[in-house]
Image: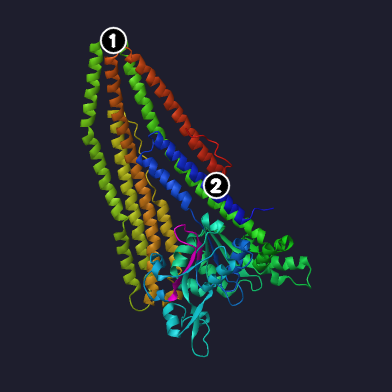
Amino acid sequence: MATSFNDQFDQHGTWRREFALRLKLLAEWLKDHELLDAGVEERLLRLETQLRSDKVMVAFVAEFSRGKSEMINALFFAGYGRRIMPASAGRTTMCPTEMGYDADVPPCLRLLPIETRLQPQALMEWRMAPEKWARIDLDVNNPIQLAKALEKVAETRKVTQDEARALGFWHAQAPEDNPMVDAQGMVEVPRWRHALINIAHPLLKQGLVILDTPGLNAIGAEPELTVSLIPQAHAVVFMLGADTGVTKSDLSIWREHLITESTDPDARLVVLNKIDTLWDALSTPAQIQTQIDRQRTSTADILGIPKERVIAVSAQKGLVAKVTEDDVLLRQSCLPVLEDVLGHGMMGKRQKILASAMKGGITDLRGETGRVINIRKRDLTEQMLELQSLQGKNANVIKHMRNRISQEQAEFDQGGAKIHAVRSVHLRLLRDVFNILGASVLKKEMALLSDTLLQKGLKLGVKRAYSETFDRLRGNLQRVQSLCAEIQSMLEASFTSLNAEYGFSLQPPVEPDMARFSADLDTVERNHLQYLGLGNAFKLAQPEFADRLVRALSTRLRNIHEAALADVELWSKSAAAQLDAQLRERRRNFARRIEAIDRISQAAGGLEDRIGEINQQSNALNELDAKLMELTSYLVAAQQSAKPATKVDVELV
């Protein structure tokens, strides 16, 4: 039987926890053997944080009444034995809803009032103000209370047409998309703008985030959904009705919000839901299957995707089958087919990406730590040669040797000015990088763009303003790349000089590559273009919408800048940590050499004893090197297999 999405995700979570434990044990081992310098510690911390905080977001996108909430119930919450998300007739999700798990927050449902759309803050800013959200505590062990509480996401309220227009739900230029007007001239809109559900569901605890979005009108009115949340989802399930096929509004969502030049086609699945409506008692199973295949082919042709990316299922029958443990009905619902595609396709791809990042980090970590061990080996070799040259020599020769070591130490200490100069130039150039990628530069760019968008009337030149903004941001990244290249060149020259003068083995780490962040900017720009055409000219004419758009853009761009800065900081720390480590080891080496000479002067057998000790230390370093290779090789092998280990089978000593 195919592995379900739940099982696949559970295996992924087990693998992540096992790998994180391994990293923690490796860090403790490195610390015990004084191999945990600042650069290695930072790299380990980033790897562990990436593993533990890695989220996998699955977004469900569709028009109203396509069965999104029922699909979420069937895929993730059938174990409760009932519906958890509201999915009955007339009770459907009306606001974007995120389900995840945060151990620092008690189980609860938080709801952001729809009136916050009248204020300029972006969703990300509202997340930082928990007091503005309505909160309902959840009893995760009581399915009835849980389902009752989550019905809040289906709540609506009646407002005037003017209020609906201000909230973004009424557009005179697109009357076909407007909500119905009742006898009193009122229209129905969602009561809540956004919902956050925090529950300790096993999958959510392992990092799964589920995003349930309402229909086209709500998606288009909330820029942060289409600019940030949906594009960053690792899997997007676009749902259609098997009974209706691809409607005009379905096609609008697909073209405007889900497909861009940068979209990964493997991250988009189309689900043709409600195939049970085609189960006609007057038709044979073969005729029903032919009709379903015809719908899949037609859907694939209209959306321009391969037929295998269209999965036909019945979420409602799949949920019933799981609750009643009806294997025959479960197979008929085709829900296991969807679970298999989600599990082995999308989840497998996500796990490979994460595993590749782990492999790169571990390889770099092994290289940095191995250099420290090699320095110690070289120092011991120098000591051994030095002591062997004293065998059979008198006290005057030994005294002369001590004076020479003391003189070398003094000259080394005096050379600290050169090392300080390297640090000073390094820090000065880094400050320039931090200024370019800092918050003030981005804030200034967003202010200029906001001024353009908030001009009165139609913004016919807004595309040019956007293009110029992104051109300047890409230019900033190019300047950062040039500065990094300058720093790298300076480090290479300085490290070469220090290696020659002091016998160091410094090797500059690979400079950060800004190309991937520039590609991220390209993606964000393309995602925004949907809002800049003539079709959205009237929306852009509304100051509150334009302001929300810029704020959503600012949040996404800030994340890109912070990620770029994090790469630069890690690179800088790795270079500085190398220098610190070799300085520390060299000073220890001077102290050990002088101590050895003093012991030899005080005791006749001291020379042979010290040579014996160095041999033991050399053997210990060889064992240390072998253990480092063993531990890191295990981690690399673990990420390549991407399967959870059954036991801890590498002993840490």
Q: How many marks?
A: 2
| Coordinates of residue 612 in the picture (x, y in percent) | 39, 17
Disc 1 marks which residue? 393
The stretch drawn in magenta includes residue 102: yes
Give the percent coordinates (x, y) of residue 254: 54, 68
Q: Is residue 425 visible?
A: yes
353 magenta-colored: no
Residue pictured at 41% horizontal, 65% vertical: 127
On the picture, is 28 further left or further right than 291? left
607 or 376: nearer the eye? Answer: 607
266 over 284 or under it: above or below: above
Query: For the magenta stretch, what is the residue range?
Result: 98-114
Quadrant position of residue 162? bottom left
Residue closest to the eye, 230 or 607: 607
Q: Earlier in the sequence, mark 2 or mark 1?
A: 2
Q: Is residue 593 left or right of residue 407?
A: right
- Classify mark 2: residues with Cα within 10 Å, few (<14), some (14-19) or many (20+): many
Q: In which quadrant of the rendered view does residue 223 lie?
A: bottom left
| Residue at horizontal 48 percent and vertical 77 percent from the top | 191
Mark 2 near mark 1, Cβ–Cβ under 8 Å? no
**Figure quadrant of residue 558:** bottom left
Q: Residues within 10 Å of mark 1 (few under 14, many from 20)?
A: few
Residue tagged 2: 15
Q: Residue at x 34, y 34 (%)?
A: 506
Q: Is residue 139 left or right of residue 435?
A: right
Secondary structure under the numbered disc 2 in the rendered image: helix
- Residue 217: percent from left, percent from top: 50, 75
Q: For residue 463, say whether it is visible.
A: no
The type of residue carrying mark 2 is Trp
**Residue 195 position (above or below residue 426):** below
> Percent position (x, y) of residue 457?
36, 79
